[in-house]
Image (cartoon, helix red, strand yellow):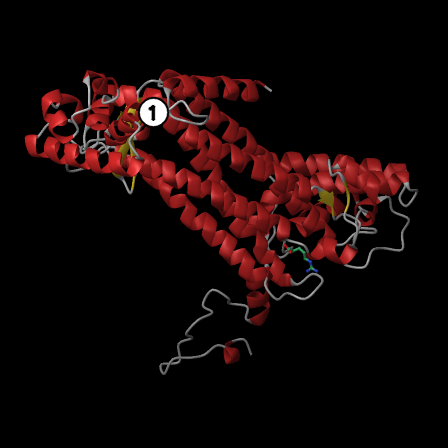
Amino acid sequence: MTDEIKPKSSKGQTMWGGRFAAGPGALMQAINVSIDFDRKLATQDIAGSKAHSDMLAAQGIITAEDRDAIHTGLDEIGAEIANGSFPWSEELEDIHLNIEARLKDKIGDAGGRLHTGRSRNDQVATDFRLWVRDHLDLFGQQLTTLIEALVDQAAENADTIMPGFTHLQSAQPVTFGHHMLAYAEMFARDRARFADCRTRMNESPLGAAALAGTPYNIDRDMTAAALGFDRPMANSLDAVSARDFALEALSAATICATHLSRLSEEIVIWTSAQFQFIKLSDAFTTGSSIMPQKRNPDAAELVRAKVGRIMGALTALTIVMKGLPLAYSKDMQEDKEPVFDAFDALELGLAAMAGMVADMVPNKDKLAGAAGAAFSTATDLADWLVMTLNMPFRDAHHVTGAIVAMAEKQGKTLDALDLADMQTVEPRITEDIYTVLTPLASASSRTSYGGTAPSEVRKQVKTWRGKLAK
Ligand code: ARG
Protein backbone atom coordinates (compact mmCIF):
# COMPACT_ATOMS: atom_id res chain seq x y z
CA MET A 1 0.00 0.00 0.00
CA THR A 2 2.82 2.28 0.94
CA ASP A 3 4.68 1.89 -2.33
CA GLU A 4 1.53 2.22 -4.41
CA ILE A 5 1.32 5.95 -3.81
CA LYS A 6 4.95 6.59 -4.67
CA PRO A 7 5.66 7.32 -8.35
CA LYS A 8 8.01 4.74 -9.81
CA SER A 9 10.64 4.99 -12.51
CA SER A 10 10.54 2.66 -15.49
CA LYS A 11 12.94 0.37 -13.59
CA GLY A 12 10.49 0.22 -10.73
CA GLN A 13 12.53 2.43 -8.40
CA THR A 14 10.57 4.91 -6.34
CA MET A 15 11.26 8.49 -7.45
CA TRP A 16 10.87 10.03 -4.05
CA GLY A 17 9.90 9.08 -0.58
CA GLY A 18 12.98 6.96 0.06
CA ARG A 19 13.21 8.57 3.47
CA PHE A 20 9.58 7.86 4.29
CA ALA A 21 9.75 4.12 4.68
CA ALA A 22 6.45 3.92 6.52
CA GLY A 23 4.43 5.59 3.76
CA PRO A 24 1.69 8.19 4.18
CA GLY A 25 1.84 8.20 7.96
CA ALA A 26 5.51 9.05 7.84
CA LEU A 27 4.91 11.69 5.21
CA MET A 28 2.24 13.28 7.34
CA GLN A 29 4.60 13.37 10.25
CA ALA A 30 7.42 14.76 8.15
CA ILE A 31 5.36 17.67 6.89
CA ASN A 32 3.59 18.26 10.19
CA VAL A 33 6.51 18.17 12.58
CA SER A 34 7.94 21.42 13.93
CA ILE A 35 9.90 20.29 16.98
CA ASP A 36 13.21 20.68 15.12
CA PHE A 37 12.76 24.44 15.13
CA ASP A 38 10.05 25.35 17.63
CA ARG A 39 12.06 23.88 20.50
CA LYS A 40 13.53 27.38 20.53
CA LEU A 41 10.29 28.35 22.30
CA ALA A 42 10.82 26.00 25.27
CA THR A 43 11.53 28.74 27.82
CA GLN A 44 8.52 30.74 26.72
CA ASP A 45 6.30 27.65 26.67
CA ILE A 46 7.23 26.77 30.25
CA ALA A 47 6.70 30.36 31.41
CA GLY A 48 3.28 30.39 29.74
CA SER A 49 2.28 27.09 31.33
CA LYS A 50 3.33 28.27 34.77
CA ALA A 51 1.29 31.45 34.41
CA HIS A 52 -1.69 29.48 33.12
CA SER A 53 -1.58 26.89 35.93
CA ASP A 54 -1.19 29.62 38.57
CA MET A 55 -4.31 31.25 37.19
CA LEU A 56 -6.25 27.96 37.02
CA ALA A 57 -5.48 27.36 40.69
CA ALA A 58 -6.29 30.93 41.70
CA GLN A 59 -9.66 30.57 39.97
CA GLY A 60 -10.35 27.23 41.66
CA ILE A 61 -10.30 25.37 38.33
CA ILE A 62 -7.46 23.09 39.47
CA THR A 63 -6.22 22.41 42.99
CA ALA A 64 -3.18 24.01 44.59
CA GLU A 65 -1.60 20.54 44.78
CA ASP A 66 -1.98 20.05 41.03
CA ARG A 67 -0.54 23.50 40.40
CA ASP A 68 2.49 22.72 42.59
CA ALA A 69 3.04 19.40 40.83
CA ILE A 70 2.80 21.16 37.46
CA HIS A 71 5.38 23.75 38.51
CA THR A 72 7.79 21.13 39.87
CA GLY A 73 7.41 19.07 36.71
CA LEU A 74 7.94 22.08 34.45
CA ASP A 75 11.06 23.06 36.39
CA GLU A 76 12.46 19.57 35.93
CA ILE A 77 11.66 19.71 32.24
CA GLY A 78 13.37 23.08 31.94
CA ALA A 79 16.47 21.60 33.57
CA GLU A 80 16.39 18.56 31.24
CA ILE A 81 16.20 20.84 28.21
CA ALA A 82 19.04 22.97 29.53
CA ASN A 83 21.34 20.01 30.22
CA GLY A 84 20.49 18.22 26.99
CA SER A 85 18.78 15.17 28.51
CA PHE A 86 15.22 15.98 27.40
CA PRO A 87 13.82 13.14 25.26
CA TRP A 88 12.71 15.08 22.17
CA SER A 89 10.13 13.22 20.11
CA GLU A 90 9.15 13.85 16.50
CA GLU A 91 5.97 11.83 17.01
CA LEU A 92 4.90 14.49 19.49
CA GLU A 93 5.06 17.05 16.71
CA ASP A 94 5.87 20.29 18.44
CA ILE A 95 7.25 21.95 21.56
CA HIS A 96 3.86 22.16 23.24
CA LEU A 97 3.05 18.46 22.95
CA ASN A 98 6.60 17.43 23.80
CA ILE A 99 6.52 19.33 27.06
CA GLU A 100 2.97 18.37 27.95
CA ALA A 101 3.60 14.66 27.32
CA ARG A 102 6.75 14.76 29.41
CA LEU A 103 4.84 16.49 32.18
CA LYS A 104 2.20 13.74 32.20
CA ASP A 105 4.97 11.12 32.35
CA LYS A 106 6.36 12.87 35.38
CA ILE A 107 3.26 13.88 37.38
CA GLY A 108 0.38 11.88 35.91
CA ASP A 109 -3.16 13.27 35.97
CA ALA A 110 -2.17 16.72 37.22
CA GLY A 111 -0.21 17.13 33.99
CA GLY A 112 -3.37 16.38 32.04
CA ARG A 113 -5.18 19.24 33.80
CA LEU A 114 -2.72 21.89 32.61
CA HIS A 115 -4.39 22.22 29.22
CA THR A 116 -7.77 23.16 30.73
CA GLY A 117 -9.17 26.34 29.18
CA ARG A 118 -6.36 26.66 26.68
CA SER A 119 -5.46 25.40 23.21
CA ARG A 120 -2.23 25.07 21.31
CA ASN A 121 -3.51 27.93 19.17
CA ASP A 122 -3.37 30.53 21.93
CA GLN A 123 -0.37 28.75 23.44
CA VAL A 124 1.80 29.08 20.33
CA ALA A 125 0.66 32.66 19.75
CA THR A 126 1.70 33.48 23.33
CA ASP A 127 5.05 31.69 23.15
CA PHE A 128 5.96 33.31 19.85
CA ARG A 129 5.02 36.76 21.06
CA LEU A 130 7.19 36.31 24.13
CA TRP A 131 10.10 35.15 21.98
CA VAL A 132 9.80 38.06 19.56
CA ARG A 133 9.42 40.49 22.46
CA ASP A 134 12.66 39.25 24.05
CA HIS A 135 14.45 39.85 20.77
CA LEU A 136 13.04 43.34 20.33
CA ASP A 137 14.49 44.11 23.75
CA LEU A 138 17.81 42.56 22.77
CA PHE A 139 17.98 44.61 19.56
CA GLY A 140 17.27 47.75 21.58
CA GLN A 141 20.28 47.01 23.81
CA GLN A 142 22.49 46.12 20.86
CA LEU A 143 21.55 49.31 19.06
CA THR A 144 22.42 51.32 22.16
CA THR A 145 25.86 49.70 22.20
CA LEU A 146 26.32 50.48 18.50
CA ILE A 147 25.21 54.10 18.96
CA GLU A 148 27.65 54.46 21.88
CA ALA A 149 30.49 53.26 19.64
CA LEU A 150 29.50 55.75 16.94
CA VAL A 151 29.30 58.61 19.43
CA ASP A 152 32.74 57.69 20.81
CA GLN A 153 34.18 57.82 17.28
CA ALA A 154 32.44 61.15 16.73
CA ALA A 155 33.90 62.57 19.93
CA GLU A 156 37.40 61.53 18.91
CA ASN A 157 36.97 62.76 15.36
CA ALA A 158 34.91 65.91 15.70
CA ASP A 159 37.55 67.77 13.67
CA THR A 160 38.86 64.96 11.48
CA ILE A 161 38.26 66.31 7.99
CA MET A 162 37.12 63.98 5.23
CA PRO A 163 35.44 64.36 1.87
CA GLY A 164 31.66 64.36 1.90
CA PHE A 165 30.11 62.72 -1.14
CA THR A 166 27.09 62.98 -3.35
CA HIS A 167 26.85 60.41 -6.14
CA LEU A 168 30.03 59.01 -4.52
CA GLN A 169 31.80 62.03 -6.04
CA SER A 170 33.65 64.39 -3.70
CA ALA A 171 31.22 67.16 -2.87
CA GLN A 172 32.18 69.22 0.18
CA PRO A 173 34.49 68.58 3.12
CA VAL A 174 32.77 67.16 6.18
CA THR A 175 33.97 65.86 9.51
CA PHE A 176 34.36 62.17 10.26
CA GLY A 177 32.49 62.73 13.50
CA HIS A 178 29.55 64.18 11.60
CA HIS A 179 29.48 61.14 9.35
CA MET A 180 29.44 58.82 12.39
CA LEU A 181 26.59 60.75 13.97
CA ALA A 182 24.51 60.42 10.80
CA TYR A 183 24.48 56.68 11.49
CA ALA A 184 23.77 57.25 15.17
CA GLU A 185 20.58 59.06 14.10
CA MET A 186 19.58 56.23 11.77
CA PHE A 187 20.17 53.52 14.36
CA ALA A 188 18.30 55.54 16.97
CA ARG A 189 15.26 55.53 14.70
CA ASP A 190 15.65 51.76 14.33
CA ARG A 191 15.72 51.46 18.08
CA ALA A 192 12.56 53.56 18.35
CA ARG A 193 10.86 51.39 15.71
CA PHE A 194 11.60 48.23 17.71
CA ALA A 195 10.36 49.90 20.90
CA ASP A 196 7.21 51.06 19.17
CA CYS A 197 6.57 47.59 17.77
CA ARG A 198 7.04 46.16 21.27
CA THR A 199 4.42 48.51 22.72
CA ARG A 200 1.87 47.49 20.11
CA MET A 201 2.54 43.76 20.34
CA ASN A 202 2.60 43.53 24.12
CA GLU A 203 -0.88 42.06 24.58
CA SER A 204 -1.58 38.50 25.67
CA PRO A 205 -3.33 35.95 23.43
CA LEU A 206 -3.45 33.41 26.28
CA GLY A 207 -6.99 32.37 27.16
CA ALA A 208 -8.36 32.88 23.66
CA ALA A 209 -8.22 29.05 23.58
CA ALA A 210 -8.79 27.46 20.17
CA LEU A 211 -10.52 30.53 18.72
CA ALA A 212 -13.72 31.35 20.62
CA GLY A 213 -12.67 31.72 24.23
CA THR A 214 -13.61 29.20 26.92
CA PRO A 215 -16.50 28.46 29.28
CA TYR A 216 -14.11 28.16 32.26
CA ASN A 217 -13.96 31.11 34.58
CA ILE A 218 -10.43 32.06 33.61
CA ASP A 219 -8.69 35.33 34.50
CA ARG A 220 -6.89 36.60 31.42
CA ASP A 221 -5.71 39.75 33.16
CA MET A 222 -3.84 37.61 35.64
CA THR A 223 -1.96 35.56 33.02
CA ALA A 224 -1.28 38.67 30.95
CA ALA A 225 0.29 40.43 33.94
CA ALA A 226 2.29 37.36 34.96
CA LEU A 227 3.88 37.23 31.51
CA GLY A 228 4.66 40.94 31.40
CA PHE A 229 1.94 41.78 28.88
CA ASP A 230 0.13 45.10 29.25
CA ARG A 231 -3.31 43.52 28.83
CA PRO A 232 -5.08 40.54 27.26
CA MET A 233 -5.95 40.78 23.56
CA ALA A 234 -9.55 41.89 23.27
CA ASN A 235 -10.76 39.48 20.58
CA SER A 236 -10.14 35.74 20.79
CA LEU A 237 -10.27 35.24 16.99
CA ASP A 238 -7.71 37.98 16.49
CA ALA A 239 -5.58 36.64 19.35
CA VAL A 240 -4.96 33.27 17.67
CA SER A 241 -4.82 34.63 14.09
CA ALA A 242 -2.65 37.70 14.39
CA ARG A 243 0.94 37.53 13.21
CA ASP A 244 1.27 41.17 12.25
CA PHE A 245 3.47 41.62 15.32
CA ALA A 246 6.02 39.34 13.63
CA LEU A 247 5.62 41.11 10.29
CA GLU A 248 6.11 44.46 11.97
CA ALA A 249 9.19 43.23 13.82
CA LEU A 250 10.59 41.86 10.54
CA SER A 251 9.87 45.18 8.80
CA ALA A 252 11.77 47.06 11.48
CA ALA A 253 14.53 44.44 11.25
CA THR A 254 14.69 44.89 7.48
CA ILE A 255 15.06 48.66 7.76
CA CYS A 256 17.71 48.25 10.45
CA ALA A 257 19.57 45.71 8.31
CA THR A 258 19.42 48.18 5.41
CA HIS A 259 21.15 50.75 7.59
CA LEU A 260 23.74 48.17 8.61
CA SER A 261 24.35 47.38 4.95
CA ARG A 262 24.94 51.03 4.08
CA LEU A 263 27.53 51.44 6.81
CA SER A 264 29.06 48.10 5.81
CA GLU A 265 29.37 49.27 2.24
CA GLU A 266 31.18 52.40 3.38
CA ILE A 267 33.55 50.29 5.47
CA VAL A 268 34.26 48.10 2.43
CA ILE A 269 34.98 51.20 0.32
CA TRP A 270 36.95 52.97 3.03
CA THR A 271 39.23 50.01 3.73
CA SER A 272 40.07 49.52 0.03
CA ALA A 273 43.60 50.27 -1.21
CA GLN A 274 42.13 53.02 -3.39
CA PHE A 275 40.57 54.87 -0.44
CA GLN A 276 42.50 53.84 2.70
CA PHE A 277 40.22 56.08 4.77
CA ILE A 278 40.12 53.72 7.75
CA LYS A 279 41.92 50.67 9.07
CA LEU A 280 40.28 47.64 10.62
CA SER A 281 42.28 45.34 12.86
CA ASP A 282 42.78 41.62 12.30
CA ALA A 283 39.77 41.10 14.55
CA PHE A 284 37.46 42.07 11.69
CA THR A 285 39.46 41.21 8.57
CA THR A 286 40.77 38.04 6.98
CA GLY A 287 43.74 37.28 4.78
CA SER A 288 43.59 35.73 1.35
CA SER A 289 44.75 32.14 0.88
CA ILE A 290 46.67 33.10 -2.24
CA MET A 291 47.40 36.85 -2.12
CA PRO A 292 49.59 37.56 0.92
CA GLN A 293 49.05 41.33 0.78
CA LYS A 294 45.26 41.11 1.11
CA ARG A 295 43.24 42.18 4.10
CA ASN A 296 39.61 41.57 3.31
CA PRO A 297 36.74 43.25 5.16
CA ASP A 298 34.75 40.00 5.33
CA ALA A 299 32.81 40.97 8.44
CA ALA A 300 31.54 44.14 6.76
CA GLU A 301 30.67 42.23 3.60
CA LEU A 302 28.71 39.63 5.57
CA VAL A 303 26.82 42.28 7.51
CA ARG A 304 26.10 44.00 4.18
CA ALA A 305 24.59 40.73 2.93
CA LYS A 306 22.39 39.98 5.95
CA VAL A 307 19.64 42.27 4.73
CA GLY A 308 19.04 39.74 1.97
CA ARG A 309 17.88 36.96 4.25
CA ILE A 310 16.14 39.34 6.65
CA MET A 311 14.08 40.93 3.92
CA GLY A 312 13.55 37.45 2.49
CA ALA A 313 12.01 36.44 5.81
CA LEU A 314 9.67 39.43 5.72
CA THR A 315 8.60 38.50 2.20
CA ALA A 316 8.18 34.83 3.10
CA LEU A 317 5.99 35.49 6.13
CA THR A 318 3.97 38.17 4.36
CA ILE A 319 3.10 35.65 1.67
CA VAL A 320 2.30 32.92 4.21
CA MET A 321 -0.16 35.24 5.96
CA LYS A 322 -1.70 36.68 2.81
CA GLY A 323 -5.23 35.45 2.23
CA LEU A 324 -5.47 33.25 5.35
CA PRO A 325 -9.02 33.08 6.65
CA LEU A 326 -9.66 33.46 10.39
CA ALA A 327 -8.82 31.89 12.70
CA TYR A 328 -5.84 29.51 13.04
CA SER A 329 -4.56 27.60 9.99
CA LYS A 330 -1.60 25.28 10.03
CA ASP A 331 0.06 27.56 7.48
CA MET A 332 0.93 29.66 10.49
CA GLN A 333 3.37 27.05 11.73
CA GLU A 334 5.55 28.41 8.91
CA ASP A 335 5.82 31.72 10.78
CA LYS A 336 8.68 30.75 13.03
CA GLU A 337 11.62 29.73 10.87
CA PRO A 338 11.86 32.98 8.89
CA VAL A 339 11.71 35.01 12.10
CA PHE A 340 14.26 32.81 13.90
CA ASP A 341 16.64 33.01 10.97
CA ALA A 342 16.21 36.73 10.41
CA PHE A 343 16.63 37.58 14.07
CA ASP A 344 19.75 35.43 14.44
CA ALA A 345 21.17 37.26 11.43
CA LEU A 346 20.31 40.68 12.81
CA GLU A 347 21.71 39.85 16.25
CA LEU A 348 25.00 38.82 14.69
CA GLY A 349 25.05 41.78 12.31
CA LEU A 350 24.47 44.30 15.10
CA ALA A 351 27.17 42.73 17.25
CA ALA A 352 29.69 42.65 14.39
CA MET A 353 28.94 46.26 13.43
CA ALA A 354 29.35 47.55 16.99
CA GLY A 355 32.68 45.72 17.08
CA MET A 356 33.84 47.17 13.76
CA VAL A 357 32.86 50.72 14.63
CA ALA A 358 34.78 50.52 17.91
CA ASP A 359 37.71 48.89 16.12
CA MET A 360 38.14 51.18 13.13
CA VAL A 361 40.89 53.79 13.07
CA PRO A 362 40.50 56.69 10.65
CA ASN A 363 43.58 57.51 8.58
CA LYS A 364 43.58 61.27 9.15
CA ASP A 365 46.22 62.13 6.54
CA LYS A 366 44.46 60.23 3.79
CA LEU A 367 41.12 61.70 4.76
CA ALA A 368 42.46 65.26 4.80
CA GLY A 369 44.21 64.76 1.46
CA ALA A 370 41.07 63.41 -0.14
CA ALA A 371 39.01 66.19 1.42
CA GLY A 372 41.13 68.80 -0.36
CA ALA A 373 41.00 67.09 -3.73
CA ALA A 374 38.48 67.62 -6.53
CA PHE A 375 37.97 71.34 -5.78
CA SER A 376 35.84 70.44 -2.80
CA THR A 377 35.84 74.03 -1.52
CA ALA A 378 34.37 75.52 -4.71
CA THR A 379 31.06 76.17 -2.95
CA ASP A 380 32.95 78.07 -0.25
CA LEU A 381 34.53 80.26 -2.92
CA ALA A 382 31.10 81.02 -4.39
CA ASP A 383 29.67 81.69 -0.91
CA TRP A 384 32.57 84.14 -0.25
CA LEU A 385 31.70 86.03 -3.43
CA VAL A 386 28.07 86.25 -2.32
CA MET A 387 28.78 87.22 1.28
CA THR A 388 31.71 89.61 0.64
CA LEU A 389 30.88 91.13 -2.74
CA ASN A 390 27.11 90.83 -2.52
CA MET A 391 27.18 88.97 -5.85
CA PRO A 392 23.99 87.07 -6.81
CA PHE A 393 24.60 83.35 -6.17
CA ARG A 394 24.08 82.42 -9.84
CA ASP A 395 26.82 84.87 -10.92
CA ALA A 396 29.10 83.64 -8.15
CA HIS A 397 28.52 80.08 -9.37
CA HIS A 398 29.65 81.17 -12.85
CA VAL A 399 32.77 83.00 -11.60
CA THR A 400 33.71 80.01 -9.44
CA GLY A 401 33.33 77.70 -12.41
CA ALA A 402 35.87 79.76 -14.32
CA ILE A 403 38.32 79.69 -11.38
CA VAL A 404 37.91 75.91 -11.00
CA ALA A 405 38.65 75.51 -14.72
CA MET A 406 41.81 77.58 -14.23
CA ALA A 407 42.92 75.47 -11.26
CA GLU A 408 42.26 72.31 -13.22
CA LYS A 409 44.39 73.62 -16.08
CA GLN A 410 47.22 74.55 -13.70
CA GLY A 411 46.94 71.23 -11.87
CA LYS A 412 46.50 73.01 -8.52
CA THR A 413 44.02 72.88 -5.65
CA LEU A 414 41.93 76.04 -5.18
CA ASP A 415 43.85 77.19 -2.09
CA ALA A 416 47.14 76.93 -4.07
CA LEU A 417 46.03 79.33 -6.83
CA ASP A 418 47.72 82.74 -7.11
CA LEU A 419 45.57 85.66 -6.08
CA ALA A 420 46.53 87.53 -9.28
CA ASP A 421 45.25 84.65 -11.36
CA MET A 422 41.92 84.62 -9.54
CA GLN A 423 41.66 88.37 -10.01
CA THR A 424 41.84 87.94 -13.77
CA VAL A 425 38.41 86.30 -13.44
CA GLU A 426 36.99 88.59 -10.73
CA PRO A 427 39.13 91.66 -9.85
CA ARG A 428 37.35 92.28 -6.51
CA ILE A 429 38.68 89.04 -4.96
CA THR A 430 41.10 89.78 -2.08
CA GLU A 431 43.65 87.91 0.04
CA ASP A 432 40.77 87.12 2.42
CA ILE A 433 39.59 84.43 -0.01
CA TYR A 434 42.25 82.04 1.33
CA THR A 435 40.52 81.88 4.70
CA VAL A 436 37.69 79.86 3.15
CA LEU A 437 39.53 77.68 0.65
CA THR A 438 40.99 74.98 2.92
CA PRO A 439 38.88 71.92 3.74
CA LEU A 440 39.10 72.64 7.47
CA ALA A 441 37.90 76.23 6.99
CA SER A 442 35.10 74.95 4.78
CA ALA A 443 33.86 72.39 7.27
CA SER A 444 34.32 74.73 10.24
CA SER A 445 32.13 77.37 8.61
CA ARG A 446 29.13 75.02 8.43
CA THR A 447 27.74 75.85 11.83
CA SER A 448 24.05 75.78 10.94
CA TYR A 449 22.05 73.45 13.20
CA GLY A 450 22.87 69.87 12.23
CA GLY A 451 25.83 71.06 10.13
CA THR A 452 29.24 69.44 9.87
CA ALA A 453 31.38 71.99 11.76
CA PRO A 454 33.52 70.51 14.56
CA SER A 455 31.76 72.85 17.00
CA GLU A 456 28.37 71.44 15.95
CA VAL A 457 29.61 67.86 16.16
CA ARG A 458 30.85 68.48 19.71
CA LYS A 459 27.43 69.86 20.65
CA GLN A 460 25.72 66.82 19.15
CA VAL A 461 28.10 64.45 20.96
CA LYS A 462 27.13 66.13 24.19
CA THR A 463 23.43 65.81 23.43
CA TRP A 464 23.92 62.14 22.55
CA ARG A 465 25.85 61.41 25.73
CA GLY A 466 23.04 62.98 27.71
CA LYS A 467 20.44 60.83 25.93
CA LEU A 468 22.51 57.66 26.31
CA ALA A 469 23.04 58.22 30.01
CA LYS A 470 19.28 58.06 30.57
N1 ARG B 1 2.90 23.73 16.07
C1 ARG B 1 1.78 24.56 15.86
C2 ARG B 1 2.19 25.92 15.28
O1 ARG B 1 3.33 26.22 15.32
C3 ARG B 1 1.04 24.78 17.13
C4 ARG B 1 -0.42 25.03 16.96
C5 ARG B 1 -1.09 23.84 16.47
N2 ARG B 1 -2.50 24.01 16.50
C6 ARG B 1 -3.30 23.15 15.85
N3 ARG B 1 -4.57 23.41 15.93
N4 ARG B 1 -2.84 22.15 15.18
O2 ARG B 1 1.41 26.66 14.76
Residue at (41, 74) in percent of width and height: 15
- Name the foreground residue: 55 vs 366: 366
Q: Is the distance from the Cβ of mark 1 to the nearest ligand 1 atom less than 8 Å?
A: no
Bin the neighbour count of mark 1 within 10 Å (Cα to Cα): few under 14, some 14-19, many 20 and up.
Answer: many
- Asked whether, in this view, residue 204 is left or right of residue 144, the answer is right
Q: Quadrant of the C terminus?
A: top right
Q: Position of residue 416 (x, y in %)?
A: 13, 22
Seen in the picture, residue 245 relative to 51 is either above or below; the reply is below
Residue designated by label 1: 176
Q: Residue at x 61, y 66 (%)?
A: 323
Confirm whether residue 225 shows in the render. Answer: yes
Is 285 left or right of 14, judged from the image as shown? left
Q: Position of residue 171 (x, y in %)?
A: 27, 35
Which quadrant of the structure image shows residue 285?
Answer: top left
Q: Quadrant of residue 60?
A: top right
Q: Amino acid at mark 1?
A: Phe
Q: Vertically, is 348 above or below 430?
A: below
Is 409 or 403 nearer to us in this picture? Answer: 403
